[in-house]
Image: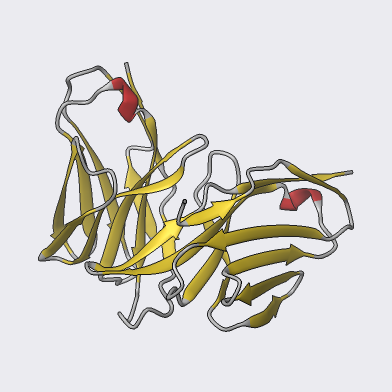
Amino acid sequence: QKEVEQNSGPLSVPEGAIASLNCTYSDRVSQSFFWYRQYSGKSPELIMSIYSNGDKEDGRFTAQLNKASQYVSLLIRDSQPSDSATYLCAVLILTGGGNKLTFGTGTQLKVEL
Amino acid sequence: DADVTQTPRNRITKTGKRIMLECSQTKGHDRMYWYRQDPGLGLRLIYYSFDVKDINKGEISDGYSVSRQAQAKFSLSLESAIPNQTALYFCATSDSTGTGMGETQYFGPGTRLLVL
């Protein structure tokens, strides 16, 4: 089982719709969770971080965390063509050598006009 | 100016050549990382360093070495490049407090490497 799993997509949504991106993780003691956006050929950029169960909202983005079910999701409201990118879920996993940020393979989102 | 810079941005080399990728940061972070990204495989950690005297192997360190010359500089070397090291390489930094919270990583622009 992969430590962090995401559906590779592509996930296609019409402009103005809500895009829902999901991520599951295997390490029950993980405490920190991140969503990064990566445009093709560019570097990942942080969108959201979440540490507690529940929802965290920032503009059009909402991160949702459920530690009991070991999943974290990202909702994008009023999706725009500029949101078309690959979204990487990252989970901070505690190891004997220190904390390690582990990334999923990413979900490609396409927002269609 | 960018906070995390990488040089070169693109590099073509031949099998067996030694090459070095460099990373510099002005964020004042102690922790630095090297990742490679391949289609369908996501970001994979090569090496990381929590301070100047600390170097740790990541999940795919074979064929690579690193040097942490200063807090702000972290270099990745391919001693004898091979074609399956063709990938997009990213340097990242973080300011973790070490408590497990807030491990936000900031990425450089990437180096696209092609090994022929």
Relative to B112, is A15 above or below?
A: below
**x, y percent for residue B72:** 23, 62
Q: In this orientation, does residue B1 appear?
A: no
**x, y percent for residue B81:** 22, 26
Residue at image coords 41%, 44%: B110
Res A71 quadrant in image: bottom right
Relative to A88, is B105 above or below?
A: below
**x, y percent for residue B30:** 25, 71
Question: On the rendered image, what quadrant is the C terminus of chain B found in?
Answer: top left
Residue at image coords 32%, 81%: B97
Res A27 quadrant in image: bottom left
Relative to A33, is B66 above or below?
A: above
Res B106 quadrant in image: bottom left
Number of numbered discs overlaid on the protein picture: 0
User: Residue lying farthest left?
Assistant: B53
- Snapshot colouring: secondary structure
**x, y percent for residue A2:** 46, 51
From the viewer's perspective, is B88 left or right of B116?
A: right
Q: In this orientation, does residue A42 appear?
A: yes
Name the foreground residue: B44 vs B74.
Answer: B44
From the viewer's perspective, is B31 left or right of B10?
A: left
From the viewer's perspective, is B29 left or right of B107?
A: left
